[in-house]
Amino acid sequence: MQRFKEDFIFGTATSSYQIEGAVNEAGRTPSIWDTFSLTPGKVNNGDTGDVACDHYNRFEEDIEIIKSLGVDSYRFSIAWPRVFPHEGQYNPEGMAFYKRLATRLKEEGIRPFVTLYHWDLPQWAYEKGGWTNRESINWFMEFAEKCFEELDDVVDMWITHNEPWCVAMLGYYEGVHAPGHQNLQEAIQVAHHLLLSHGMAVQYYKETLKKDKPIGITLNLSPVYPASVEEMDYTAAQHFDGYLNRWFLDPVFKGSYPEDMKALYGKNGCDFDFIHDGDLELISIPCDFFGINFYNRALIEASADHPFLYQHAESDYPKTGMGWDISPNEFRELIYRVREDYTRLPIFITENGAAFDDQLEEDGTVKDEGRKSYVEQHLETIAALNEEGMGIQGYYLWSLLDNFEWAFGYDKRFGITYVDFKTQKRYVKDSAKRYTEIVRARTI
Ligand code: PNW
């Protein structure tokens, strides 16, 4: 039996486009995810976020679910195109939704943890070059400033960006996320502008506004392992680690991009003219915490077919419904590495969870044993890590609700609450009941 300290924060998380729906309500204009999901062939079954969990209209009911879970905090994101539907045009009605949501949460004693950018770039910004355009930093700042001004009173913690790797690399290099480009030069430029806008928002919040809520960034990290002792597999693993982890960790915590990756990207035709004097100082501005989203480890082997000479290797680990390795031990190693190589800031696990093929039973239960045990294993690991002084201050289970799982549409269910997308009825899964037990007892 292990104990979580009284001040450990238990939470659950979502993001705007994945749950809200109501894409045309109260002046919202399209985001790149509306455009992308409406483009044939991009999302499974042609699913879109048009309705999603209809959270925009049902948030009161969803707050009841959050309350029933007994969690301390709820992490959600703000849809930029609700707040700035057109360039330079602020929409108070769009902001009002988040004010209501955060205020209601606070009234219930649930701490709002707000992500500014969880991927729903306004289409108008995309049409002006999106994140490839350095101007995007100014557009983002206008949005961030309004959010700080209007919401800081009812928000407990701020995250600037969620998973810039996904935005940059899945969106602009691999092409599987919006806007679906496949251009490495664009991708590293996008990553740079995302990180720069993070630094600027933190500087503005702390130095100009002199506000004092904790503010930070969330990266998705996977510890990377070579599939064999062969030199080629080691090199491949090194590349994948550089691509996924170090390209983001190094600038944020060391103020530099990794040289080996610059060489690799250079060999693949990239230049770095987009990096201006002073950028890396801003990117590495001190934050108050570090957010980590953890799902799985990566097992990597050499491949001559990929520009970075890597591919994912077959592994015999147990898997989630995404085919991702269940790897709590590697999670433990990841945290040690972050501590040794990067930062001593308080760590928040801002996402962790799993998709499984859930069955809704006739009696309204969902016996999601796989998810229950996934969550237990990772919470046990966190409790043990904290025994060892690793300073993890909170855990946000992804996700409160089954939702729009990006390119996978509604096929992949990550929720601890089952959503019947025909009726919008919610059913609390067994994993949620188990989570509530852990949260209430603060022991596992
Ligand atoms: C994260 N990958 O996305 C996001 O923050 C969530 O919005 C999402 O629902 C959740 O994880 C589950 O996928 C990721 O391909 C998407 O490595 C893809 C990857 C990683 C994270």
Image (spheres, rainbow, N blue to C red):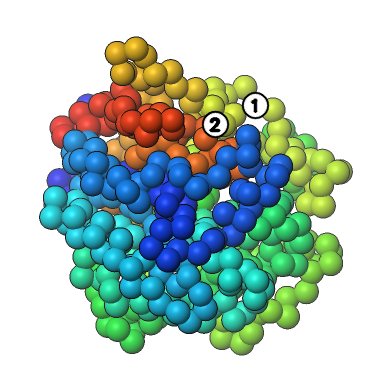
Provide the secondary structure element on which disc 1 rests.
loop
- Mark 2, Cα crowd under 10 Å, few <14 / some 14-19 / many 20+, is some
Marker count (numbered): 2
**Where is residue 374 drawn, in percent x and y?**
41, 28
Please say if 103 is above or below 18. Answer: below
Q: In which image quadrant can residue 399 be found? A: top left
CA gap, disc 2 and disc 1: 23 Å
Q: Position of residue 280 (x, y in %)?
A: 56, 78
Which residue occupies 51% across, 75% down? Answer: 86
- The quadrant of the picture occupied by the C terminus is top left
In the picture, the disc for residue 411 is 2
**Mark 1 = which residue?**
315
Q: Nearer the viewer, residue 32 or 29?
A: 29
| x and y percentages locating residue 365 in the rendered image | 31, 18
Q: Residue at x 54, y 31 (%)?
A: 411
Viewed as shown, does residue 124 lie left or right of 206?
right
Q: Which mark is residue 247?
A: none
> Does the numbered disc 1 mark a residue whose Cβ is under 8 Å from ligand 1?
no
As shown in the figure, which amino acid type bears the numbered disc 1? Answer: Ser
- Can residue 16 be seen in the rendering of this structure? yes
